[in-house]
């Protein structure tokens, strides 16, 4: 008997970050009984750390800007495995979604005309790459994520969304038809385990940057949604595609926004050379993030790194002047002084490529419906299951995300998921109830953990996992190294499944939560490792020493990782634009 | 070795709270207080505290550090250690759930009290509502609040009247909307604050200003609200 309480909702959103709260807002506005399960108070979600802005063709900086140019940039940036239909939808719908946020009160920075301030970001162009650098990233100083997340929380308060704050979703509950009918979740404060039943379950669980030792991501970015999805037997897509942000603060890992380079900052090596001029003669420091990150690593490997160990480069900002830095990048001044002990007004910031963003995730269509792929290779909708934001792979980022596109992804697809679920609820959703055995199945992992005592410490195992990922699946990858990494992860699996939980108490037991997070990290790490080894080419963020070229003949496709067989399959990229003919793959230069 | 003294309380095990002493090898580094807590948790997994971004923007790890409220993730030992000793307690004035984790319900209720969202019922334009850089500048120093509760839990007026006084954080947010040129509910907002407690229990002690990890100034915002209330009464 699954002897636990049931709570029922029309829609349950797992995750209280940007995409989850945007989806929740849509549903709460429509009057459906909506709950957000979030393991931290919503404004502590990782969206809060986004700095530079949200990219969108609102035609403020350039009155002639066009969303089609943004679409072109995003497709090129994705190294051509972003789904063009989804990118078209995002870029076209974007302005509406941005103006809604502004009407809700988001305190955007302003131009003299009173419009939203936009700054240049990497990979942005006018006129389909022919018109030079664009300035398309809408900003609230360098605290855009904070401003956006708080505005969304405020909007949800206004619309009386139910928040299950500091609740942790443990596993998916599936019914006899393999449809998703909610989750088992723990109330962290009391330790109570509850079946949260829902007609629509939305995963907005964010990324998993904590699989790497060095990451810009918050402690909470542990891929819980991906872990649950894989344990439920559903696939993930393009999970080998991890973005390394060029400018994490050396040592601390904290993010320094691309907006620094957008405002005129640039990278230098130990000789003071502005080296990006050699690697990307046109875009220079505003080339795609994958290109800049690789160039930095090459500078370091070739002995031109800075510092006593030559293991980082410098981001120079002092030439912008104190006034500009205070007005445009106040948060960066604070972070650099705190974590790098460097004052950017007078000295450069030591930076190094740092794990930042998971391009892959749960495959979905534009409406947020989660997908699996049947034996004939056709997409099949998983009934009752939806995903949006970083946890999803809709896919607008393909093999490399452009800066400023993650916040747009959050609001556009959070909103789209909410609207689609609203429509489905109106038409009526009828899913079979979960049986006792179905609920019991979703509690198996938790029950096993609660009974465990003689295993190893979660913190030690987590460090080991992060070190493996950092060493074998970093900016540059190689087949034999990756095979070794996969073997090490295989050895780690039984040890992590047997992790010790010596603290059995119920009140705010973060040991239990961290052990569950560790198990999620392992699922993400293993899927990443196996898929990365399988993709025998270099594309976007996936750069292999042993397969240096992009291989469109074999790999102009999504990878799909099936957890039951640990098999990597392929899925076609969507080239069906509604408003024009598709953008054909080109050689990608900046 | 650094001496660390930490407030411990697990309601299922402990009859009452106590201070537990630890020794931590910092290897001479000027670590952040959060780093020290993480080291201790690796040794003693029962130690409980909140944390998320570890860079001072999410507001999870507000705590009382050697007598002063602050965020553990951006407070270096060099600022917090006195005579080789670090003392960490939960934020004062709110119920403790366990160890360094407090029940923030009261604090959040005060935030909700001030209607922390834009109110403007005129039809929205097809683009953004225009706002000049000067109008927007009035929001600087207000919108950056991270709801960490360091200020309110350092405020004696909040300790005495948490049910009636909105507290520095809530009032800072109240002024954030009063100061926004796009918000049209000024009168309604002021009417909701116009009683002897909500605003006027602030006695200008300025503990809030001293502890705010974002360098914000709630006392100044409260002063602006007072002036608006007084002006609207005449």
Image: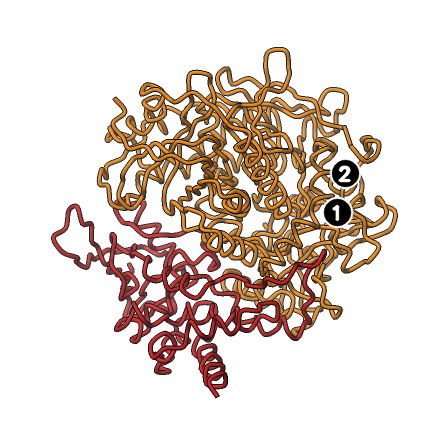
Chain colours: A orange, B red
Quadrant of the frame with the C terminus of chain A: top right
Residue appearing at x 73%, y 20% in the figure: A554
Give the number of callouts: 2
Question: Label 1: which residue?
Answer: A123
Between B195 and A392, the one lying in front of the other is: B195
Question: Label 2: which residue?
Answer: A76
Residue A401: horizontal and vertical position, in percent? 66, 41
| Badge 2 vs badge 1, beta-carbon distance below 8 Å | yes
Residue A296: horizontal and vertical position, in percent? 67, 47
Question: Disc 2 to disc 1, how far (Cα)?
Answer: 9 Å
Direction from residue A272 to residue B198 in the image, left or right: left
Residue A171 in view of the camera: yes
Q: Is residue B216 above or below residue A369?
A: below
Residue A32: horizontal and vertical position, in percent? 48, 40
The chain identifier of the residue carrying mark 2 reads A
Residue A249 in view of the camera: no
Between B202 and A317, the one lying in front of the other is: B202
Residue A466: horizontal and vertical position, in percent? 46, 38
Residue appearing at x 44%, y 40% in the figure: A33
Pointers 2 and 1 within a single chain: yes
Asked which secondary structure carries label 2, the reply is helix
Q: Is residue A277 above or below residue A533?
A: below
Between A556 and A413, the one lying in front of the other is: A413
Most extreme residue toward the top, as rendered? A376
Query: Which quadrant would residue A103 be assigned to in this image?
Result: bottom right
| Among numbered discs 2 and 1, the one appearing first in the sequence | 2
């Amino acid at each position: 008997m699954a002897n636990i309480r049931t709570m029922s909702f029309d829609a349950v959103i797992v995750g209280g970050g940007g995409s989850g709260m945007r989806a929740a807002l849509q549903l709460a506005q429509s009057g459906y009984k909506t709950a957000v399960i979030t393991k931290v108070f919503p404004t502590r979600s990782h969206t809060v750390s986004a700095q530079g802005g949200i990219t969108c063709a609102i035609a403020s900086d350039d009155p002639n800007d066009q969303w089609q140019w943004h679409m072109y940039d995003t497709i090129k940036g994705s190294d051509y495995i972003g789904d063009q239909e989804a990118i078209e939808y995002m870029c076209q719908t974007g302005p509406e979604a941005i103006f809604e946020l502004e009407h809700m009160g988001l305190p955007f920075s302003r131009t003299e005309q009173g419009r939203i301030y936009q700054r240049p970001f990497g990979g942005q162009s006018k006129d389909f790459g022919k018109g030079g650098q664009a300035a398309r990233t809408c900003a609230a100083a360098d605290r855009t994520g904070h401003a956006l997340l708080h505005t969304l929380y405020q909007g949800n308060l206004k619309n009386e969304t139910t928040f299950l704050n500091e609740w942790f979703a443990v596993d998916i509950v599936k019914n006899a038809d393999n449809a998703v009918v909610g989750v088992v979740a723990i109330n962290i404060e009391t330790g109570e385990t509850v079946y949260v039943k829902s007609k629509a379950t939305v995963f907005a669980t964010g990324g998993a940057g904590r699989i790497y030792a060095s990451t810009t991501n918050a402690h909470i970015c542990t891929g819980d949604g991906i872990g649950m999805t894989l344990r439920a037997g559903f696939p993930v897509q393009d999970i080998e595609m991890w973005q390394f942000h060029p400018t994490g603060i050396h040592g601390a890992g904290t993010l320094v926004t691309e907006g620094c380079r957008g405002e005129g900052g640039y990278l230098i090596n130990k000789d003071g050379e502005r080296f990006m001029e050699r690697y990307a003669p046109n875009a220079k420091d505003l080339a795609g993030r994958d290109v800049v990150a690789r160039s930095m690593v090459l500078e370091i490997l070739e002995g031109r790194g800075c510092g006593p160990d030559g293991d980082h480069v410098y981001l120079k900002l002092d030439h912008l002047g104190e006034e500009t830095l205070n007005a445009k990048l106040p948060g960066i001044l604070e972070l650099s002084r705190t974590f790098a002990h460097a004052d950017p007004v007078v000295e450069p910031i030591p930076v190094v490529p740092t794990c930042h963003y998971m391009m892959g995730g749960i495959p979905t269509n534009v409406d947020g419906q989660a997908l699996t792929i049947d034996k004939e290779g056709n997409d099949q909708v998983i009934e009752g299951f939806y995903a949006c934001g970083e946890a999803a792979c809709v896919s607008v980022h393909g093999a490399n995300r452009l800066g400023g596109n993650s916040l747009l992804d959050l609001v556009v697809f959070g909103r789209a998921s909410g609207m689609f679920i609203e429509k489905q609820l109106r038409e009526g959703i009828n899913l079979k109830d979960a049986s006792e055995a179905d609920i019991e199945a979703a509690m198996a992992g938790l029950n096993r953990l609660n009974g465990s005592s003689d295993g190893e410490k979660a913190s030690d195992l987590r460090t080991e996992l992060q070190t493996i990922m950092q060493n074998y699946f970093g900016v540059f990858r190689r087949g034999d190294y990756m095979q070794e990494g996969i073997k090490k992860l295989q050895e780690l699996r039984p040890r992590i499944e047997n992790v010790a939980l010596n603290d059995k108490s119920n009140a705010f037991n973060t040991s239990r939560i961290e052990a569950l997070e560790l198990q999620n990290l392992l699922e993400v790490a293993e899927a990443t490792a196996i898929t990365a080894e399988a993709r025998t080419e270099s594309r976007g963020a996936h750069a292999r020493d042993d397969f240096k070229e992009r291989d469109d003949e074999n790999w102009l496709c999504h990878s799909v990782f099936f957890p039951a067989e640990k098999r990597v399959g392929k899925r076609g990229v969507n080239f069906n634009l509604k408003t024009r003919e598709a953008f054909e793959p080109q050689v990608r230069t900046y | 070795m650094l001496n660390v003294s930490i407030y411990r309380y697990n309601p299922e095990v402990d009859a009452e709270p106590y201070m537990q002493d630890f020794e931590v090898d910092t290897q001479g580094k000027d670590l952040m207080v959060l780093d020290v807590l993480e080291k201790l948790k690796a040794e003693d997994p029962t130690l409980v505290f909140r944390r998320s971004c570890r860079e001072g923007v999410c507001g999870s790890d507000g705590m009382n550090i050697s007598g002063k409220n602050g965020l553990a993730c951006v407070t270096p030992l060099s600022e917090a250690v006195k005579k080789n000793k670090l003392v960490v307690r939960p934020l004062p004035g709110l119920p403790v759930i366990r160890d360094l984790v407090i029940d923030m319900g009261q604090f959040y209720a005060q935030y909700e009290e001030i209607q922390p969202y834009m109110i403007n019922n005129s039809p929205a334009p097809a683009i953004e509502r225009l706002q000049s850089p000067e109008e927007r500048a009035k929001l600087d120093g207000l919108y950056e609040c991270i709801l960490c509760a360091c200020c309110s839990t350092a405020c004696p007026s909040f300790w005495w009247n948490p049910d009636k006084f909105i507290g520095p954080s809530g009032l800072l947010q109240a002024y954030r909307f009063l100061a926004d040129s796009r918000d049209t509910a000024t009168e309604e907002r002021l009417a909701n604050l116009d009683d002897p407690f909500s605003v006027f229990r602030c006695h200008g002690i300025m503990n809030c200003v001293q502890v705010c990890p974002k360098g914000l100034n709630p006392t100044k915002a409260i002063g602006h609200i007072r002036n608006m209330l007084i002006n609207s009464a005449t």
